[in-house]
Amino acid sequence: MGAPPLPGPFSGERAANAAVRAFVAQAARRGRATSGHHNRNYVLPLTEDMARRLGRPAGTQVTVRMRRPGALPVVIRTWQDETEVLGAVGRLLPHVPQCLAKGPGFAIHSYVEGTALSTVCADDKPLDTLLVKALADVFARMAQVRREALPRLPACWPRNDKDSQGFLRTLAHLADQQIHRQNRQEFGGLFAALGVPEDALLRFAERVPSMARRPYALLHTDLHRANLILPFSPEPPLFCVDWELAGYGDPLHDLATHLVRMRYPSHQWEEVVEAWAEAMRPVRPAAVNGLAKDLGHYVAFERAQSLYPDVLRAAASLRDLTDERSLHAAAARVHGALRRAARPLGLRDIPGEPEIGRILFRWREARTGGHGLHARIRDWDPVHRIAEHPRFPRSAVREALYAEGAAPAGRVFKGTGHLNSVVRVPGVDFAVVVRRKVANACRRERGFLSEHAVLRAIERSRVEVAAPKFLALGTSYQGEPFAIHTYEGPRDIGRPPGHPVHGLRPHEADRLVDQLGALTRVNYREVDPAAGEGLFHSWLSEQLVLLVAELPKESQRLARLLGLPDAPRLRQILARHRVGERRPALLHGDLNPWNLVRRSDELALTLIDWEMAVVGDPLYDLVRHMHLTPTRPEIRDRMFRRWAQRLDPEFTADWQRDWRVYRWIEIVRSAYIDLDRLVTGESLDAPNVRRAVDSYAMTLASAIGSLGLPHRPNPHLPRALT
C-alpha cells in the first residue's frame, strides 16, 4: 500500500517529477520548519500547480517531510515506509495525516491545524484528566487495527501473536542490530570507555522473564508531547503524528514508551495506567493481562535502549560545538542516561560527570584535531623525571593520545582499575596501550610500588620475563594521568588477547615458573630501597587486618553475620601462624588469568598489569597465582617441583611446610574482598571478579573452617548474596 499516484494533467513523468522536486525545494526555502530527530517538516500552502496535481484546493496547507541528511540510526524501525502505515491507521483514526505524494527522501502529507502538546504543556507537567482519557482512547483505537491491514512484518517477528516474552526479546535484539551495531564503528569505543559491555542488550534479552500472553496490536512507539497535536477544531481532542516508528506487538510496550517519553510526573503514572486499562478492556480485554507484573519489564527496556540514542546524540552534538559549556552539558546528559539504564542493563561502576567529560573530550579530539577547545591533546604534560624511551619519542605520545579517542570497541578494555585503549601510531612498528586509571575505581587491595618503575627495572635487568615495556607517563586534559605501554596481545590488534581462564597448559605452567624464577634476578632495590628489612609474612598479615578494618560498615556488619571475625580478632588468629624467612624478590602480586596473556613463542605467557607488584617471599607469588587461577592438582604439583628445582635454595627453603599458610591467608582474604564486592557492587563486570563471587558460598565455608571458628551461618545467606 503506497501513496496515491499524483493526479492531474501531466506533460510526462519527467515534468511531473520536476514539478514535485521544485515544490519540495520551495518548502525547504520558505516553509514553516519544525525539526525532529529523524525528519525535517516544512508546512506551506499548495501552489496552483501542485494543488491541481494533488486534487486539493489551491492554498491548502500541507506538510513536506524530509529525512534529515546524515541522521544517526538511533531508533528501532519495524517498517521503512511510513506511508503504508498511515493508510492502515487512517481507517480507524481519521485525523491521522494522509500521504498525498512521496518521492526519494521526502513525502507530502495532509496538514491539520493545531498545536503540539509540548508547546502548551511542558515536560514533567501533569496532563489534564480529560486529555489522559483521550490519549487512552487513541491506544484503544490502535488496538482495533487488524494485522492484515498492515505491511508485512520482518522475518524475525515472533510467529505467535500473543508471545509477550518473545516480543520483548525481539525488541532487544532489534535495538542491538539497528542502533548499537549500526553505530559501533564510530561510537563503539566510546561505549566501551563508559563501561557499557558490547553484549549489554543481548544479555538483557536473555534475562527477559516469562510474561502473560497478550494479543498483539498496532503500536505507535513514539507518543511524546511533540507528536501529540491539539487541533483548533473541537473534535477530536487530540491526534498523533509521526508514525514512522510504528510497529506491531505487545500493547504494553506502547504504554511503557509513552509513560517514559511523555515525562509525566511520577504521581500521574498510576492515573495514566488506569485510564489505559479502562479504555482497553471493552475493545481488547486480554491486552490488560498481567499489566501490573509486566509493565515494569517494558519500562526497563525503554530506559535500557534509550541509553544508546542519548549517548550518540550527546557525542554527535560536540562535532560542531567548540566550547567547554557544551562539553559539560553533553557529559551531564550521558551521565543521566547511564544512571537510568544502569539497573536494566546491569551496569556497574558508572563514571562521574568529570570522567565522562574527559572521555567525550578524547572522542571528540580524535575526530576534530582539537579545533576550538583551548585545552588540546597537543598540550599534554610529560612527567619530566621519566626519561624518554628511545623507541617512543614524545611526538609519538601525542599521536597515541589522538588515536586513543578513536579506538574501536574491540580495542578498549575496562578492568577493575584501568581503562586500556590499544592503538597504532604512525612511524612506530608496534602497537601500544594507553592506560588511564578509572576515576571511581575502589580497590580494597592497595598497590605499593610504581608500575612504571617496576617495568623499567625489569627492562633494564634483561632477564627473561615477558612484560610490557613502559613508554611514557604524563597528564592530559584536566590534568588526567595516563601511561603508555607496549601492547602484549596478538600482533593483529583486531583479535582479542587469549587468557588461561580455565587454567594453565603444562608448557605454560613451566614457562610461568621460569619467569617467576627470573624475577628473583631483578634488582628490586631500584623500586623499593627499603625492601627486605622486615618479615614479609608478618607484613602481609597486617595488611589483611588493615583491609578488614577499612571495609565499609555494611560490609563489616554482614561479615560478622556470616561468621567472619572483625579486625582485632583476625589479627589474633593470624598471629598463630609463622612461615620461614626466605630471600625476598620482586613479585607480580596479582597473577590471575586475565593478567596472563598467551603468546606463541617459547615464553608462552606475558605478565601484564603490574600495579600490585611488591617485594617479598617468592613462594607467595606462586601460591597466590594458584589461588586465583583454576589449577588442577597435577599442574600444581608440576609447578611446585619445577619451582623447587629451578630457584636457588635461599628462595625455596621449607616451602613444603609454608605454602599452605599462604594459601590459607588468600582464602581468608577472598572471603572479605568478595563479600565487599557483593555488597557494594564494585567491579562485578570484571570476569575474574564475577567468577570469584559466583563461588562465594564455597569460599566462605573454606575461610570459616580454616579460621577454626565454630559459628556456621545460615547456608542460604551466602547463596542469596550471589
Image (spheres, rainbow, N blue to C red):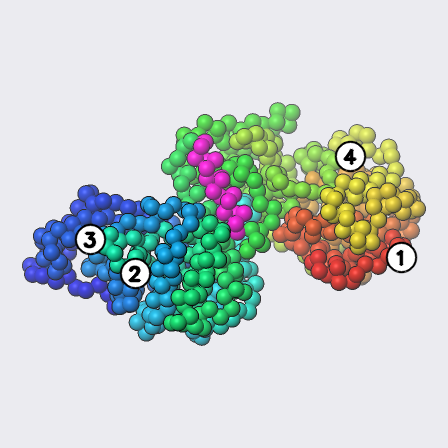
Image mark for residue 306: none
| Residue to which mark 4 is pinned | 524
**Residue 82's disc number:** 2
- Tell me the distance, in whole angstroms, between the alpha carbons under discs 3 and 4: 79 Å
Q: Earlier in the sequence, mark 3 or mark 4?
A: 3
- State the residue in front, 475 or 608: 475
Magenta-colored stretch includes residue 551: no
Along the line of sight, the residue nearer the viewer: 430 or 189: 189
Task: Establish if 707 lies above or below 361.
Answer: below
Mark sitting on residue 710: 1
As helix, strand or loop, the secondary structure at mark 1 comes to: loop
Residue 242 position, x and y percent, is 31, 56
Name the residue at 16% across, 49% down: 45
CB atoms of marks 2 and 4 within 8 Å: no
Q: CA distance from mark 3 to mark 2?
A: 16 Å
Earlier residue among tags 4 and 1: 4
Instruction: Give the residue pinned by disc 3.
Output: 62
Query: As drawn, is 580 to the left or to the right of 89?
Result: right
In this rendering, the label closer to the viewer, 2 or 4:
2
Q: Secondary structure at mark 2?
A: helix
N-terminal of the pair, mark 3 or mark 2, is 3
Q: Of callouts 1 and 2, which one flags the residue occurring earlier in the amino acid sequence?
A: 2
Q: Is residue 586 above or below residue 9?
A: above
Instruction: Say what amino acid the circle numbered 4 marks.
Output: Tyr
